Image (spheres, rainbow, N blue to C red):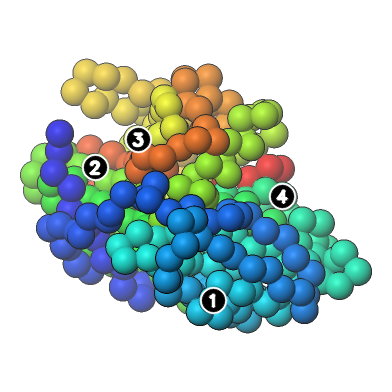
């Protein structure tokens, strides 16, 4: 089993490593009465914890929904907010979708026609996306798995990547950061976005994809000036699926992964969409009763020192 090292995200680049992290208590010790709630602007919803316990409550988007220290949520404006309750070292979270009065927004929002095609779909499952762009998806985010260094982490295996540079604008033209890594001198590379107990409800929401995987795609943007092939893997509650991105197939110690996509290597962003059936046909399954940490995204970039891995706008969505 390879040792994991956590990578800290700075404003525009990945800049540091931490050799270990604090283990959480049993995530099954407490339960929220709901993990997904939809309410209108101005309405309230009372969260409760079983068994009853004192918690520290917070909202990641107070402009969308606030929560007091008794777990009472007040809807402010249309959009999505994640409400978190921390009981000792156990973190529970729920997605609150706020709809505009009269039914506009939330699960059936009006989509801005000026948005790029990749932001006009429905049922978004976020892995990497800046906050400004995520706000444009209000009401359409079904799970937020993005790195927060709380319940989801970006890990590098055995220090096989080092921090790279991330300059300029991100894929959607925003001055917000994205993961940027370079292969180190060890001779191989591997990283993963690992989601843990505080977001198990978000992982469980991904089970909806399995109803008809053909309706969904994985979207990712990448940029580089080298010609390296990268292996991209999605891990499910059970099974996994992987593809190679590049001109050639990816050779991992004799295990060959077929290249299915590529992007222009001129230092500008390239957009890639891969049907989710590519992964589910290999055995990937998202379940509704997941209670284990898993890597929602994995990259291998070979062993050539200096190879660049930069990615952004990574999410699964229904087209």
Element under disc 1: loop
Report how far apart the C-alphas of labels 4 and 1 lie in the structure: 33 Å
Which residue does the numbered mark 2 point to in the structure image?
190
Report how far apart the C-alphas of labels 1 and 3 lie in the structure: 46 Å
Q: Is residue 268 left or right of residue 97?
A: left
Crowding at mark 3 (Cα within 10 Å: few <14, some 14-19, many 20+): many
Element under disc 4: strand
Quarter placement of the C terminus = top right
* Closer to viewer: mark 4 or mark 1: 1
- What percent of the width, then of the height, locates residue 140? 69, 56
Element under disc 3: strand
Q: Is residue 213 left or right of residue 243?
A: right
Report how far apart the C-alphas of labels 3 and 2 lie in the structure: 9 Å
* Closer to viewer: mark 3 or mark 2: 2
Which residue does the numbered mark 1 point to in the structure image?
70
Count of numbered marks: 4
Report how far apart the C-alphas of labels 2 and 4 lie in the structure: 31 Å
- What percent of the width, then of the height, locates residue 161? 19, 52
- What percent of the width, then of the height, locates residue 278? 53, 26
Which residue does the numbered mark 3 point to in the structure image?
231
Q: Which mark is residue 122?
A: 4
In this view of the protein, can residue 172 be seen by the observer?
no
Q: Nearer the viewer, residue 188 or 83?
A: 83
* Closer to viewer: mark 1 or mark 2: 1
Question: Residue at left 67%, top 77%?
Answer: 74
Q: Are marks 1 and 3 in contact (CB under 8 Å)?
A: no
Q: Are marks 1 and 2 in contact (CB under 8 Å)?
A: no
Q: Is residue 258 left or right of residue 157?
A: right
Q: Earlier in the sequence, mark 4 or mark 1?
A: 1
Q: Earlier in the sequence, mark 1 or mark 3?
A: 1
């Amino acid at each position: 089993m390879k040792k994991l090292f956590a990578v800290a995200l700075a404003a525009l680049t990945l800049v540091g490593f931490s050799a270990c992290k604090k283990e959480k208590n049993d995530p099954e010790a407490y339960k929220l009465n709901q993990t997904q709630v939809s309410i209108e602007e101005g309405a309230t919803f009372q969260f409760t914890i079983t068994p009853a316990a004192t918690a520290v409550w917070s909202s990641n988007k107070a402009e969308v929904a606030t929560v007091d220290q008794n777990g009472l949520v007040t809807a402010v404006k249309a959009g999505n907010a994640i409400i978190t309750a921390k009981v000792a070292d156990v973190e529970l979270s729920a997605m609150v979708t706020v709809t505009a009065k009269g039914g506009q927004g939330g699960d059936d929002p009006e989509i801005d026609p000026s948005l790029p095609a990749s932001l006009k779909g429905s049922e978004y499952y976020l892995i990497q996306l800046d906050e400004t762009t995520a706000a444009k998806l209000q009401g359409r985010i079904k799970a937020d798995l993005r790195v927060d260094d709380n319940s989801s982490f970006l890990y590098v295996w055995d220090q096989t990547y080092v921090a790279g540079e991330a300059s300029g604008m991100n894929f959607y033209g925003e001055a917000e950061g994205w993961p940027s890594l370079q292969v180190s001198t060890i001779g191989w590379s591997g990283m993963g976005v690992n989601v843990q107990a505080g977001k198990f409800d978000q992982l469980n929401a991904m089970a909806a994809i399995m109803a008809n995987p053909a309706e969904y795609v994985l979207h990712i943007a990448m940029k580089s000036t080298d010609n390296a092939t990268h292996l991209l893997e999605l891990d499910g509650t059970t099974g996994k699926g992987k593809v190679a991105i590049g001109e050639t197939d990816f050779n991992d110690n004799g295990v060959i992964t077929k290249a299915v996509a590529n992007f222009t290597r001129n230092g500008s962003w390239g957009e890639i969409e891969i049907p989710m059936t590519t992964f589910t046909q290999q055995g990937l399954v998202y379940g509704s009763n997941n209670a284990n940490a898993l890597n929602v995204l994995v990259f291998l970039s070979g062993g050539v020192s200096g190879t660049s891995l930069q990615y952004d706008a990574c999410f699964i969505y229904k087209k």
